[in-house]
Amino acid sequence: MAAKGRMAWLMVLGRIAKVIVLLGVGMVLGVLVARPRIGDHSGPTQPKSTGQVQIWTCSMHPQIRLPKPGLCPICNMELIPLETSQADQRTDLAELTVSEVAARLMDIEVAPVQRRPVSIQIRMVGKVEYDQTRLAIISARIPGRLDRLYADYTGIQVRKGDHLVELYSPQLLTAQQELLQAVGTVEKTAGATLQTVRQSAQDMVEAARKKLRLWGLTAEQIKGIETSGRVADHMTFYAPIGGIVINKHVLEGQYVSEGSPIYTIADLSQVWVKLDAYESDLQWLRYGQQVEFTTVAFPGEVFTGTIAFIDPVLDPKTRTAKVHVNVPNPDGRLRPEMFVKAVVETRVAGDGRVIDPALAGNWICPMHPEVLKDGPGRCQRCGMDLVTTESLGYASAEPAEFALVIPASAPLITGTRAVVYVRKTDTNEPTFEGRQVVLGPRAGDVYLVRSGLAEGELVVVRGNFKIDSALQIQARPSMMNPQAGPGQTPPDHLGH
């Protein structure tokens, strides 16, 4: 039994000796592997000695670049040395150089900066309304009783001169008697020797005639009273204008006082189209522009009109402004409350003004855009002095220089600035330079460029986000962080 115990103890000691030997061999091998070879100063934590300043970065946050080892200011991980290439040394520039293969893999597409005429289509919706300048109220000019209404329902069409109502009025009877008495006095004083007597009688006749004309009687009615020598107990009144009766305010047999409304008549030979224009589109709209629109009632047919007014105040709920368009409607097919879809074609000059060859160099009425003349003068409708179309924002003529434009997909817009990546043509490998530009308004699928680019330069229109992402990873100036550079922390992490 004693011999078996000694044998077991010796076996345990042998195993312990083997473990100690293996541990010693492992330590020796680790020292030999970790020792730098002659002429080679590289190691797992020691960067290559290239004579350049070593940059230390975080494996989780590559935008962190510090000149010495330490901990990441964001996640507290240990920094690692960054292997830099010749191109990566220019960390203060928003510039990226890639190989031809990498450019193809990034699917980068460029387009030239162009100077060309810009045309934009503004689409609006609205509806047909009455032309407020062609609305009239037929009112009672004398008190009386309406014994008959000839236009006896709303919507009936009347022409100028059509009979409307038959009125009984005691005052009208008295005025007719005054007229007949004045006419009789003229006949009696025809042989008078004094000129003043004859002239006084004639003045009385003219005064009686004028009173009846102001009360709405026609010249034929007044002449009929004088010829017949009799007083009519009822008098018919006629329409002073033509149009559609859109309101009938009274009924037959109703008594009316002076000034009481009887009918409201709308002349539909010309109508208004009221359109809703968004505030972003107002810069492309001008007084006097031509508008084309369609309606559901007449599919495929295009109607035209002229912008006569642009509301200076926006609707606070819809953020739109009303645009009034004068539209001829001789056949009456356009009816109020019809919905329309309108399009305005606008050409823009280099300075942002609207180009309209039909209006360039002409004079226009500030209230009636259909009045257009070659020189100064007065409007034949309202008598106002005409103004030049240039004062309304039109280009004086076809400009020598058109607008400088880039495709709408080229700029990366942050809200406060716009960045465009330009491909440099003087490099062997594809090199893209980030450049801050000043943009004008967007015109369809292009942006107008105010400054920062020149005609003929190549801007990236596809793949620009990939370029910007690569610059952000390398902690270079980019769209979101224009002040990036070595040792800087992104603004989102400051104070964390």
Image: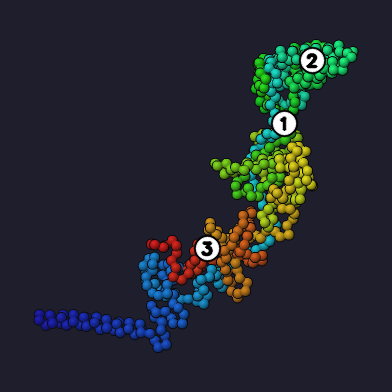
Label 2 crowd bin: few (<14), some (14–19), many (20+), radius 10 Å: many
Say whether residue 373 is left or right of residue 72.
Answer: right
* Residue placed under numbered mark 2 in the picture: 179
Mark 2: which amino acid?
Answer: Leu
Instruction: Please name whichever residue, 278 or 186, is drawn nearer the observer in this view of the structure.
Output: 186
- CA gap between label 1 and label 2 equals 35 Å
* Residue placed under numbered mark 3 in the picture: 479
Q: Residue at x 76, y 19 (%)?
A: 212
Q: Residue at x 42, y 87 (%)?
A: 39
Mark 3: which amino acid?
Answer: Met
Q: Measured from the top left, where is residue 202 in percent x and y? A: 83, 18
**Which quarter of the figure has residue 209?**
top right
* Residue placed under numbered mark 1 in the picture: 267
Q: Measured from the top left, where is residue 237 in percent x and y? A: 74, 20
Query: Which one is closest to the eye, mark 1 or mark 2?
Result: 2
Q: Measured from the top left, where is residue 347 in percent x and y? A: 69, 53
Label 3 crowd bin: few (<14), some (14–19), many (20+), radius 10 Å: many
- Count of labels in the image: 3
Asked if marks 3 and 1 touch (Cβ < 8 Å), the reply is no
Q: Residue at x 42, y 74 (%)?
A: 67
The disc, 1 or 2, on the residue closer to the chain's N-terminal end is 2
Say whether residue 398 is left or right of residue 35.
Answer: right
Q: Is residue 117 above or below residue 50?
A: above
Q: Residue at x 70, y 18 (%)?
A: 142
Mark 1: which amino acid?
Answer: Asp
Q: Measured from the top left, where is residue 373 in percent x and y? A: 78, 45
The disc, 3 or 2, on the residue closer to the chain's N-terminal end is 2
Say whether residue 410 is left or right of residue 221.
Answer: left
Secondary element at image label 1: loop
Secondary element at image label 2: helix
